[in-house]
Image (tube, rainbow, N blue to C red):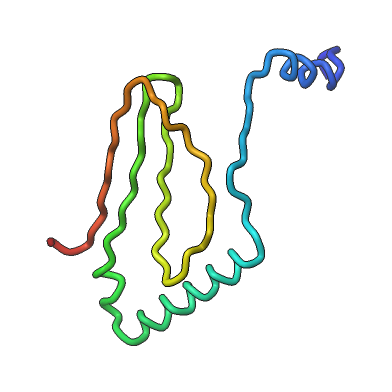
Amino acid sequence: MCGVETKVPFSLLKLLLVWIIVLVLSPTMSDTEARMEFCLWLQGMYLENPDFLQNILYLDEATFTTNGIVSSQYIRMWSENNPHWVIGCKRQYSSKTNFLSKVASKSQ
């Protein structure tokens, strides 16, 4: 192509440590089953009451910090049983701002 071996850019990236990806959660087969169960429940609720989706409040929260972390998601799960999830997080920030957004289709 351009006279550079294909291995050279990748070995430079390894030396410079440009991107480090840390995977905290990985999906399991039970996640797929729970998602399917939720989708079937939501579909059933919609078939019973077509206005059901209009009454759902959608929330998202992000934290912006001054130490290089742009956005951290805080995930909350409501369930009858404890899902026993462990989520790694960074507790010590130099300075941070929380932002909460809400999307609603009807005036509340």
Relative to 15, is 34 on the left or the right? left
The residue drawn where x is 25% and y is 51% is 102
Q: Quadrant of residue 22?
A: top right
In the picture, measured across the screen, residue 92 lies left or right of residue 3, that is: left
Q: Quadrant of residue 14?
A: top right
- Side of 73 where 13 appears, left or right: right
Of residues 86 and 98, which is closer to you in this image?
A: 86
- Residue drawn where x is 40% and y is 54% of the image: 76
For the N terminus, which image quadrant? top right
Q: Position of residue 71 (x, y in %)?
A: 42, 34
Say if 23 sits above or below 42 in the image: above
Q: Is residue 51 above or below residue 99?
A: below
Where residue 41 sits in the image (x, y, percent)?
Answer: 44, 79
Residue ranking furthest to the bottom: 48
Tell me the quadrant of the picture where the C terminus can be found. bottom left
The correct choice, above or below, for 12 with respect to 22 in the image is above
Q: Is residue 107 left or right of residue 74?
A: left
Give above or below for 29 relative to 44: above
- The percent coordinates of residue 5 (x first, y second) are 87, 17
Q: Quadrant of residue 99?
A: top left
Q: How many marks?
A: 0
The percent position of residue 46, horizontal first and vertical second, equals: 35, 80
